[in-house]
Image (spheres, rainbow, N blue to C red):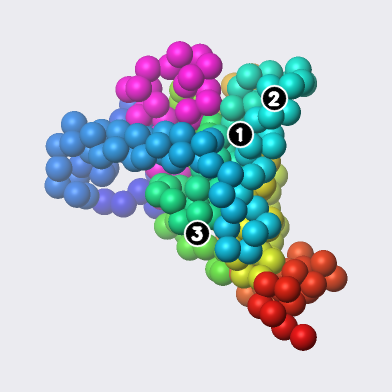
C-alpha cells in the first residue's frame, strides 16, 4: 500500500532505514525482487554520472544562445582560485550546472524529480560520494532515500512548476538531496526527515517564471544554488537542529502556497523574471519580433 505521509513512513521504518522501506515498497509495487530494484537504481545513478561527465566536457549552447558554458566558467575559476568553501562545494556547483546544461542541450539526464531540477540530487550525492569515498551501495541507498521523499511529496502535490511553482521542482529536489545526504553521512530516519523539512521550508514560495518559456533562465543556475541549500539543511539536521513545523505540515504548506500562487508565476512566463525589460528584449531577438 502506498505511503502517503512522512508520519506513515516513520511508522513503517521502525528499526529499518528509509532506503530499506523504499526498496521494499518498490519491490512490492513493481513485483520485482529488491536486488532488481537496486539494479534499476544503479542504472539511474550511472546515467546521472554520465550526464555530469558529458556536461563537464561541453560548452555547447542551447537554441537561445544564452546558456551552456557557465559550468566551464565556474571550473576555470576553481582551477585558478582558491575557493571559499572547498572541494565538495566546487563539485556540487559544477556538477549541478553540468547536468542542467546537458538538459539544455537535450542530452540524456535523469529527471529528479523533474528535468528542470535534474542537477540537484545527482550533484549532491555524487560530489559527496567522490570526496568522502562513499561506496556505490551507499549511493544507491541515498538515491532510494531521495526517491522516497519525492514520492511522498508527489502524493500530495504534483511536482510541476505549472502546478505549484519552482518550489515543487527545484525546491523538492533540494529536500530530496538533503535527505539523501543525511543517509550517506550516517544519519537516522528522524534526521533525514528533518533535513528534508528544513530544505523544503526554506524554499516555500519559489516561483516558476522562465524567460521565453525555456528551461534556461533562471532554471540552470538555480540547480547549483539549491544543491548547496541541501547541504545546509543536512548539516543542520545532523547536529540536531529541528524544523519546528513537521515535514508533513511543511508539505501541506507547499501545496497550499502553490494553490495561492498566481498563474502568472506558474510556468506561464507571463510574469516575474519572464516579463522584465531585459527578458522582453531577449524575447524580441529570439523570436524575431518587431
Ligand atoms: S523555474 Fe520553472 S521551469 Fe525552471 S526549473 Fe523551476 S519549475 Fe522548472
Secondary structure character of the magenta stretch overall: helix
Which region is colored magenta?
125-153
Q: Nearer the viewer, mark 3 or mark 2?
A: 2
Q: Quadrant of the C terminus?
A: bottom right
Residue 209 visible to the viewer: yes
Q: Position of residue 112 (x, y in %)?
A: 45, 47
Say few, some or many: other residues with alpha carbon within 10 Å of mark 1 (under 14 / 14 to 19 / 20 or more). Answer: many
Labels 3, 1: front one: 1
* Count of numbered circles in the view: 3
What residue is at 42 percent from the left and 48 percent from the top? 109
Residue 141 place in picture, x, y as percent: 36, 28
Q: Which label number is shown at residue 94?
A: 1
Q: Which residue is mark 3?
A: 159
Residue 233 drawn at (x, y percent): 64, 32
- Check the image and report above or below for 15 versus 259: above
Give SS at disc 1.
Answer: helix
Give the residue drawn at x 69%, y 25%.
78
Query: Residue 78's mark?
Result: 2
Give the quadrant of residue 83.
top right
Label 2 secondary element = helix
> Is 136 or 256 nearer to us in this picture?
136
Relative to 246, is 257 above or below?
below
Category of crowding for the residue at label 3, using alpha-carbon neighbours closer than 10 angstroms: few (below 14), some (14–19), many (at least 20): many
Q: Is residue 33 above or below residue 80?
A: below
Location of residue 281 in the rendering, given as x and y in whole percent from the top left corner: 79, 72
Asked if the magenta segment contains residue 130, the reply would be yes
Instruction: State how far apart marks 3 and 1 are (Cα).
Output: 25 Å
Amino acid at each position: 500500500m502506498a505511503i502517503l505521509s512522512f508520519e506513515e513512513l516513520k511508522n513503517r521504518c521502525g528499526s529499518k532505514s528509509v532506503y530499506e522501506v523504499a526498496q521494499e515498497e518498490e519491490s512490492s509495487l513493481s513485483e520485482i525482487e529488491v536486488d532488481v530494484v537496486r539494479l534499476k537504481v544503479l542504472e539511474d545513478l550511472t546515467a546521472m554520472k554520465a550526464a555530469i561527465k558529458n556536461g563537464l566536457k561541453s560548452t555547447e549552447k542551447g537554441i537561445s544562445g544564452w546558456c551552456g558554458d557557465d559550468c566551464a566558467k565556474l571550473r576555470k575559476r576553481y582551477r585558478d582560485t582558491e575557493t571559499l568553501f572547498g572541494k565538495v562545494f566546487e563539485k556540487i556547483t559544477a556538477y549541478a550546472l553540468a547536468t542542467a546544461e546537458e538538459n539544455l542541450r537535450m542530452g540524456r539526464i535523469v529527471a529528479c524529480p523533474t528535468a528542470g531540477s535534474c542537477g540537484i540530487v545527482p550533484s549532491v550525492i555524487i560530489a559527496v560520494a567522490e570526496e568522502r569515498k562513499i561506496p556505490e551501495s551507499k549511493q544507491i541507498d541515498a538515491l532510494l532515500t531521495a526517491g522516497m521523499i519525492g514520492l511522498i511529496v508527489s502524493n500530495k502535490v504534483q511536482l510541476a512548476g505549472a502546478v505549484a511553482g519552482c518550489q515543487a521542482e527545484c525546491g523538492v529536489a533540494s529536500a530530496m538531496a538533503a535527505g539523501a545526504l543525511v543517509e550517506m553521512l550516517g544519519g537516522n530516519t528522524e534526521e533525514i526527515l528533518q533535513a528534508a523539512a528544513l530544505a523544503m521550508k526554506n524554499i516555500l514560495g519559489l516561483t516558476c517564471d522562465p524567460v521565453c518559456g525555456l528551461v534556461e533562465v533562471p532554471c540552470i543556475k538555480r540547480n547549483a544554488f539549491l544543491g548547496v541549500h541541501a547541504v545546509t539543511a543536512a548539516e543542520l539536521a545532523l547536529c540536531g537542529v529541528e524544523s519546528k513545523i513537521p515535514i508533513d505540515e511543511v508539505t501541506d504548506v507547499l501545496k497550499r502556497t502553490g494553490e495561492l500562487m498566481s498563474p502568472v508565476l506558474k510556468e506561464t512566463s507571463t510574469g516575474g523574471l519572464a516579463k522584465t525589460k531585459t527578458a522582453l528584449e531577449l524575447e524580441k531577438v529570439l523570436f524575431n519580433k518587431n
